Image (cartoon, rainbow, N blue to C red):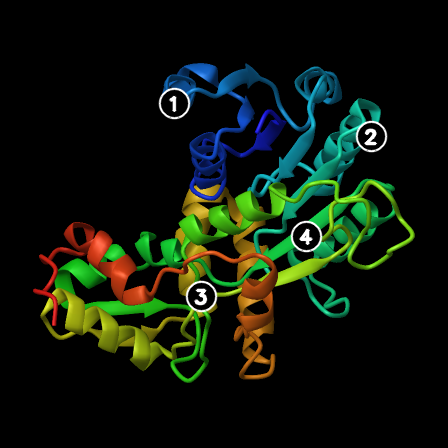
Amino acid sequence: MNDLILTYGAGGVQGAPVARGLLKHGYQVRALVRDTAKNRMLASAGAEVVPGDLADLESVRRASQGVDKVFLMLPFSGGGNPLEYAQNAIQAAQEAGVKLLVLNTSGQTPKQASGLPMLDYRIELEAMLRGSGLPQIILRPTGYMENLLGPWVLPRLQAEGVLAYPVSAKRPISWIAAEDVGRFAVAALGQSALGQSALDQSAPGQPDLAGQAFDLGGPQALTGDGLAEVFSQVLNRPIRYEAISPEAFGQIMGRMMGPQAEAGIVAAYRASEAAPLDELVVEMQGVLEKLPIQQTTLEAWVKGHAALFGSPAAAPR
């Protein structure tokens, strides 16, 4: 596997599993990061770490030179224009003649415009990529299990045995581990030019899944009470779920990301309350037939992070 793959976000929770997985499978990895000094572990693992910023087209162009494939995810922050960042990455990929671009939307793409820029930009993002002419595969993960490590969860879970999250206790979610999203991305990037596209058999030289988009979820769809039950069993102590308000969640996020992000987050979670109850449930059988990976259950994930939750994992049952 001699493909050189440019990875964006490789220093973060979502992008790091992609870089690690690609290296494990023998790919050459080039990681674009803002601060190379903070990403020495990537370099030590064998990645070529280059400085740059998605807001700076020239640095993105330099990073894209000689690249075969691209893994793209956009930074989640209250500042900057994600569509501008995406355009820079897509333009550089076009100029470099990449064979495949795999996009992680870092969330579900609305089926229709909601009026909320924090959500609707994904509609424009996907349209931009499809219109670029680049062979592409789109991954749309639902809620990350790693969201349960945030400051809106850990302090109360550790001190009170309360798992607090801004989603109704009755709403099931197909929680997915970031490592699994990384595995799906590696599987998608492993698509080779087989001479035809799965969607257009007259398109020679494209990866066989080019043009497809996949909603991604975990192997279980759990309500708030279901979450608490798994945490209780694994941590061997009572845990209860509490649905906090979007405003309380937004205040915490606002302290981290600023008032602009806070307003958008509150509006997005308010809108989700009006969505169909099964909006965050994903049926994975069809996806796994095309992108086969071993998925992580919530029980296994909690066991792996038990020390952070303030209790040793219970003995296996």
What residue is drawn where x is 52% and y is 58%? 292
Rendering quarter of residue 86: top right
Q: At label 1, which amino acid type do we have?
A: Ala
What residue is drawn where x is 37% and y is 18%? 44
Helix, strand or loop for disc 3: loop
What residue is drawn where x is 47% and y is 35%? 25
Residue 138's mark?
4
Q: Against 122, is 168 above or below?
A: below
Label 1: how many residues lie within 10 Å, few (<14), some (14-19) or many (20+)?
A: few
Q: Position of residue 82 (x, y in %)?
A: 69, 41
Q: Position of residue 242 (x, y in %)?
A: 31, 75
Q: At label 4, which amino acid type do we have?
A: Ile
Q: Which residue is identified by label 3?
A: 218
N-terminal of the two: label 3 or label 1?
1
N-terminal of the two: label 4 or label 1?
1
Q: Position of residue 289 (x, y in %)?
A: 57, 65
Q: CA distance from mark 1 to mark 2?
A: 28 Å
Do tag 3 and tag 1 residues touch (Cβ < 8 Å)? no
Do tag 2 and tag 4 residues touch (Cβ < 8 Å)? no
